[in-house]
Amino acid sequence: MNTNSRLERQEQIQFAVGMAALDGGKPTAFTQNLLHQYENGQVTSSQLKQAIIQKYVKASK
């Protein structure tokens, strides 16, 4: 598991959501749930990224 502290993970999430918001984006409920799991240290950043990729690759087919 990544050794980032909860505070570091919160900052990473805030930055990513803020960058997406600049383009008019907003996380879906699915993504918000994954971000919450990441913040709590339940999933790694790699697992988060993989879950998002799998979700939206399936949705685009």
Image: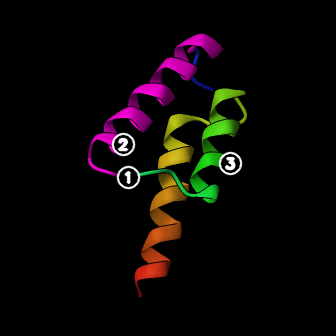
Residue at point 50%, 30% (across, down): 13
Q: Callout 3: helix, strand or loop?
A: helix
Residue at point 32%, 51% (across, down): 24
Q: Is residue 32 shown to the viewer in this render?
A: yes
User: Which residue is labeled 1 in the image?
Assistant: 25
User: Which residue is labeled 3 in the image?
Assistant: 33
Tell me the mark number nearer the camera, choosing from 3 and 2: 2
Tell me the mark number nearer the camera, choosing from 1 and 3: 1
Q: In which quarter of the image is the C terminus?
A: bottom left
Rendered image: mark on residue 21: 2
Circles 1 and 2, Cβ within 8 Å, touching? The answer is yes
Q: Residue 18 location, x and y as percent?
A: 38, 33
Alpha-carbon neighbours of circle 2 within 10 Å: few (<14), some, or many (≥20)? few
CA separation in Å, label 3 and label 2: 17 Å
Magenta span of residues: 4-24
- Count of numbered marks: 3
Q: Is residue 5 shown to the viewer in this render?
A: no
Going by the numbered disc 2, the residue's amino acid type is: Ala
Going by the numbered disc 3, the residue's amino acid type is: Asn
Q: Residue 30 location, x and y as percent?
A: 63, 58
Looking at the image, tell me whether mark 3 or mark 2 is earlier in sequence order: 2
Q: Callout 2: helix, strand or loop?
A: helix
CA separation in Å, label 1 and label 2: 5 Å
